[in-house]
Image (cartoon, helix red, strand yellow):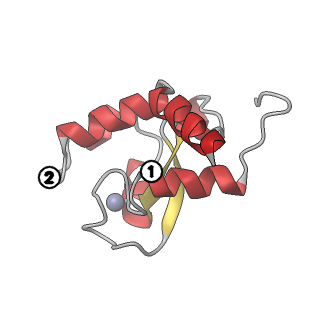
Amino acid sequence: MSIKGVVYTRSEWESTKKHWGGKCAYCGGIRAGKKNLTKDHILPASLGGQKVMYNIIPACSKCNSEKSSYLVEEWYRRQDFFNEKRLMEIYRWVTGECYSVCRKKRRGG
Ligand SMILES: [Zn+2]
């Protein structure tokens, strides 16, 4: 299932990565550095998550493959690199708080 007309663009991915400092949103890059950043669906596609900006964050290949189709909290809280601030930031991203801020900033350019 996907919403018609919703396209995830390359520039959205670029600004998403920029927002997260070019690092994995979960481990902050401590596991795999800046290499191999993948598009992680916060709500897994298998659970109906859309490929739209607010549902995509950068994750290293390790985090992405381990998280797989778990819910964010379920998986993330069990990790030794779990970070409450990062989780809150992820929630801000999902709710679109960051999204709208980022868009406003972009319009200024
Ligand atoms: Zn990671």
Q: Position of residue 39 (x, y in %)?
A: 55, 54
Can I make out residue 91 in this image? yes
**Residue 90: x and y, percent?**
37, 37
Residue picked out by circle 2? 80
Say which label, 2 or 1, has the lower sequence index: 1
Where residue 37 appears, as percent x and y from the top left, is 48, 65
Q: Amino acid at mark 2?
A: Asp
The response on whether ligand 1 sits within 8 Å of label 2 is: no
Disc 2 is placed on an element classified as loop
Instruction: Tell me the amino acid under the disc marked 1.
Output: His
CB contact under 8 Å: marks 2 and 1: no
Q: Which residue is mark 1?
A: 19
Residue 97 vs 39, above or below: the answer is above
Ligand 1 resides in the quarter of the picture at: bottom left
Residue occupying image coordinates x 76% and y 29%: 1
**Above or below: residue 59 compared with residue 108:** below
The residue positioned 85% from the left and 29% from the top of the image is 4
Which residue shows up at 33% across the image and 73% down it? 33
Q: Looking at the picture, tell me which residue is in the foreground, 85 or 37.
A: 85
Whether residue 74 appears in this view of the structure is: no
Residue 35 versus residue 62 in the image, above or below: below
Nearer the observer: mark 2 or 1; the answer is: 1
Q: Is mark 1 within 8 Å of ligand 1?
A: no
Q: Residue furthest right?
A: 5
Q: Quadrant of residue 86?
A: top left
Q: Position of residue 60 (x, y in %)?
A: 41, 63
Q: Secondary structure at mark 1?
A: helix
